[in-house]
Structure formats: structure tokens, C-alpha cells
Image: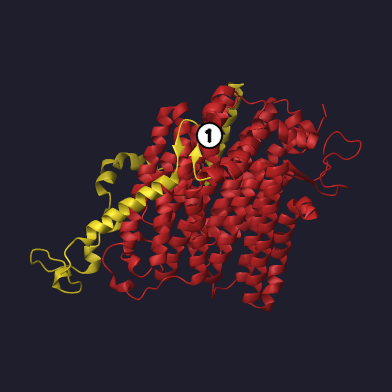
Chain colours: A red, B yellow
Amino acid sequence: MHYLVTHSPALIVALPLLAAFATPLISRAGPRVRNIFNLVVLGMTAFLVAILAVDVHAVGIRVYTFGATLPEMALPGGYTVPVRIMFEVDGMSIFMGIVITTVALAAFTYSLQFLKGQSGQPRFYSLMMLLYVGMMGLAFTGDMFNMFVFLEIASIAGTGLAAYRTRMADAVEGGFKYIVISAVSALMVLFAIGVLYAQYNVLSIAALAHYMDYTMLDMMALGLLAGAFVMKLAGVPLHMWAPDTYTVAPAGTTPMILAASYTSMYALYRVTFTLYGAHIDTRAIGWVVIIVGVLSMFIGVMMAVHQTDIKRMMAYHAISQGGYMLLGVGVGLAVIADPVALANYGRDAINGGIFHIINHVFYKAMLFMTAEAIFFRIGTRDTNKMGGLARNMKWTTAFYAIGALAISGIPPFNGFASKLLIYQAVLRFNPVLSAIAMFVSLVTLASFAKVFYSAFTGPEMPAYREVKEVPRSMIIGMGILAACIIFFGIFPGLVVDTIVAPATEALINQAAYINAVMGAVP
Amino acid sequence: MSVLDYGYAVWAPIVWIVALIVIGAIVLIWRSRGRKDYKKGTTQSDIFLSGIKVPAEEQRHVKADNIYWGFFEALKGFYNVMMKPHTGIVNDYILWFVAVVAITVLILVLAQ
């Protein structure tokens, strides 16, 4: 078991990567064999993520150095800087690992029946595995260049998946927009990495943070990194690609691309808190993050309530909910230099922002699945053409209702728990921000009530009299997420204490991240 | 485990669920004391519009476009402004990126 734990950071990325390349070959044995193979690999990876999570929470940061005599040996003999490719898994990294793995399990299960009969499935599952690899690598990486590499892997795989339904022109357009913004973001990240490497001759995040002088060039690099990651996470005003891409991606893919956006949010936090945390004016940068968060919340929800395409509405809500995360963590960043404020409400604000990541990914993924379930049965996403679906699609209706109540922050669901943390903590920082957050929740509820009325309630439409509920694997996929939503809603204290608080501590404690690699190097 | 307690606020979902169960039980008991001679599937459950012929299902159901009409009408100016940047053209998205990066670098320099 010790061997598994020690090598788990590498295995978590290597196993799905091998599966991605093996899938087209395994597919020759038949779709059933391929599906079982993929689920087994994902199950094994989930087990590895679980044991790594237990290890990181019990022992501390886990460093894995590729090619070293011992994986924990960050610095080669006689060196004062790390030179090898490295994974550094702290509380925040493993939190993202848990989020991504849970969504991947639900998405794979959902896709089993959703894609039945469609062509190109071997490529679809290969790309899903590659997207998973990209996200996990981005969450675990300890050096900047691999951050770029895994960002590219996730972006290219995501593009292929978004444009999977090539017979639909808007799917190809959505994929094209995703690759353009992803390519621009990744290249700006690479340029920033080049700027940092040229000055400090190191690529390790811990080493860069240790040697950082915060020159004008470093500020430029930070601007590029922040802009790139804000665009990837669809923060306003760089959000416009998100509705185009999320809407057209097939059901199992949209939650994964959503998770990729929040992995970019993790990368933004890693850069601001860990890489630059000791040098930037945290109050000013915190306020920039807060403003981006408030704009995302408000503009996202006001655009969402106007939509009649069900998936497009949910895509705008994803932008809006991302604003809550930025607001919570932004408040924490703004007060990080003030120990009293940090202890009073700063930590709670960051807890709320991080807790909201996992809550949002669960209920948003489930909501996208319910939207695709409707599309699967009636062939349209236009809510003007829907009505009375609750009669024949009871499970879908129930899951939609749970998701709608969760995203609106209605107790006792998980969305309420994280939003309450954010409201209460942000209230102590600035009451106006808290009021805006509550208003956005109200409009969120209004927009989901609009869709619930127009799609699920009302008289039975003659065109939908023969509509049946979706197949079992799709219900199971949605059910996994619904169970997580209800569990997290009933036991928020357990979730915050077990996985969220360590993630918050990992972000705040820059020194621990640096020391795990650099040790006692002056 | 089930309580979120952070000093200045407490959230206990179990209390909420127990309250929901109690309220739900009261509602069901109250409902059970209603009239029992109601027959579903008869003219008792037909829609009555003062004798006017009941329109077809598609005409009766309020479409999504018509919901919150007053809200959108009142905010027409806001939405006209809001829709303009959402051109759908990817070149415009990259222009926004350039502008945001420039402003961010400016803020970083001024904040120093």
C-alpha cells in the first residue's frame, strides 16, 4: 500500500493516459468490452485519488519527482534547485482531484447509453480520458511548463469533444471557438513561463516562488497568466465563448469541460496565492478578483434569465456561479495580509469559495445531464417547444428540481451551505457585495422556475405523449451526482472540515508549498 | 458532521429537514380532511372557462418567451446594452482578452 501511495500521483495520470491510447484498440473487441475497460480504469484511478487524499490530509504535501532515485527527492544530489519534472500534491490539488474524478465517473456512466448507436465512440472515450489526464495533470503539476502541457492536453481533448457531433454546424462552431480561446490562453501562459524562466532559470513553481523578485517583467507575466486563466474559466468579460461551447457539447462532455474551466480557476489561485503571493499587493489584486467575480455573477445571471435554449441558460449560470467562487476567494485574498480579518472571516470566505467549486460542479453537471436527457428524448433544447414532460420523465424532473433548488441556494441542498458561507463572510467584508450575491441567487431561482414551468409542468403535449424516461445508465449518472448533492447538503460540516479546510490552508500557507520542494535552501 | 459552525453563524441541515418533515406531515393531515367525493377523470376535473371552448394544449401553455415579459420589458435598455458585446465573433473575444490583460498589467504596476 505504501508503494501505491508513493507512486499514486504518477499512476493517477499514467493509467488514464494509457487507457486513452489503448481504447481504440480495445474497441475492436466490442463496445461492451471497451466500456468495461474504461470504467475499470476510472474506478482504479478513483481508488488511487482516494488513498492519495487520505495520505495528503494525514501526512502533508506529497511530492513526486519523475526520474529521481526516490520520488520524494525533490532536489537532486548537489543541486539547490529542482530540475526534474515534478508533481506536488497539497490540499488544494487533491481537492481538485476529487472534484474531477467524481465528475468523470458520472460523465462516463451517463455517456454509455447516451452515445449508443453513434459513430466515433472509440475516439470519444479516448478524448474523454485525455481530458481527464489533462485536468488531473494541471491540478497536480509542480512546475510551470507542465502546467502549460497539461493545459494544452485538456484544451485539445475538450475541443474534440465539444465538436463531437460534427453533423451539427453549431457544434463545430462551438469547438472552433473553444480551440481559439484555449490556444490563445495557452500561448500567453507559455510566453509568461518563458519570461519567468528567462529571469530565474527555474520552472518549478516552488522554486520560482522562492526566488521571485517581482520585477516589471514578473508583473507582465502575472497579467498574462491571470488573463489567460480568467478566459479559460469564463470570467466576465472573457466569458462569451462559454455558452457557445457548453451548449453544443454532448451531455457527458459538458460536465468535463466545466471541470476543466474550474481546473483553470485552480491554476489562477495557484499563481496568485502560491507563485506571487508574497509579493503582490493582495488587497488590490483581491479587489480585482472580487470585481471579476461580481461582474460574472451579475452579468451571467441576467443573461441566463433571458435565454430560451435550456443548455445556453445553464451555460450562463455556470458563468454566474463561477463569480461566487471568485468572490469568496477574492475576499480571502484581499484580507490575507490582515491576520485578524483572515481569522474572523477571510478563511470562511475562501472556504465558501472552494466549497462552492465542488458543489457547483455536482449540480451543474447534473443539470446539463437533465437538459441533454430532454434533448435525447424530444430532439430540441428550445423551451418554447416543451411542456408537460414531468408526466413521462419523472426521474429527469426530480433531478432537475434537485439541481434547480441546489443552484438557487435553497436549503437543505449543498448550494445553500456554500452560499451561506460566502454571504456571511462577505457581509463582514462589504455588505453591498453580499447583497448582490443574494440578489443573483434570487434571479437564479427565477430562471430555473421559468424553465421548470415551461418544460416540465403544464398540459400534456400531444407531440410528447409517447415520450419515455431516459435509459438506466443515464439515470444512474444523474443519480450519482444527486446523491452527492444531498450528502453534501446534509453533511456540510464534514465536507468543509475534511477536504475544503485543508485546501484553504494549502492556498494560504505559501511557505509550506515552497518548503516541501526547496527544504532548507536559503 | 452535519453542522456548519463558524463562530458567527450556524447552519444545521438536520434541523431544517426535521422541520420540513413536520410541516409536510401537517399538510398531509390537513389534506386528508378534505372532500372525499371528488372523482378524477369525470367532468369534475375538466377545465371550465365560463363556457368558452378550452383551447388546445399548445395554445394553453405559456411559452418560455412570454414568461417574465414585464421584467424584460422594464429592462429593455439594459438588455440592449448587454447584447451588443455578445457578438458571437471569436475575434471580438480575443480583443476583449487583449484589453483585459493590458488593464490587469496597468493595475499591477499602479498597485506596486
- Report the label total: 1
Q: Residue at x 51, y 41 (%)?
A: A235
As drawn, is A303 to the left or to the right of B33?
A: right
Q: Residue at x 69, y 29 (%)?
A: A217
Question: The N terminus of chain A is located in which quarter?
Answer: bottom right
As drawn, is A421 to the left or to the right of A189?
A: left
Q: Residue at x 48, y 66 (%)?
A: A475
Q: Where's residue A503, x and y in %?
A: 62, 40
Q: Where's residue B101, x and y in %?
A: 58, 35
Question: The C terminus of chain A is located in which quarter?
Answer: top right
- Seen as rendered, the residue at the extreme left is B51
Disc 1, SS: helix
Q: Where's residue B57, x and y in %?
A: 23, 68
Q: Residue at x 72, y 36 (%)?
A: A513
- Seen as rendered, the residue at the extreme bottom is A29
Q: Residues within 10 Å of mark 1 (few under 14, many from 20)?
A: many
As drawn, is A497 to the left or to the right of A521?
A: left
Q: Where's residue A61, x and y in %?
A: 73, 41
**In the rendered image, which quarter is residue B112 located in?**
top right
Can residue B89 be seen in this snapshot? no
Position of A511 relative to A114 (above/below): above
Can residue B77 be seen in this snapshot? yes
Position of A409 relative to A274 (above/below): below
Position of A481 relative to A55 (above/below): below
**In the rendered image, which quarter is residue A432 located in?**
top left
Q: Amino acid at mark 1?
A: Asp
Q: Which residue is mark 1?
A: A348
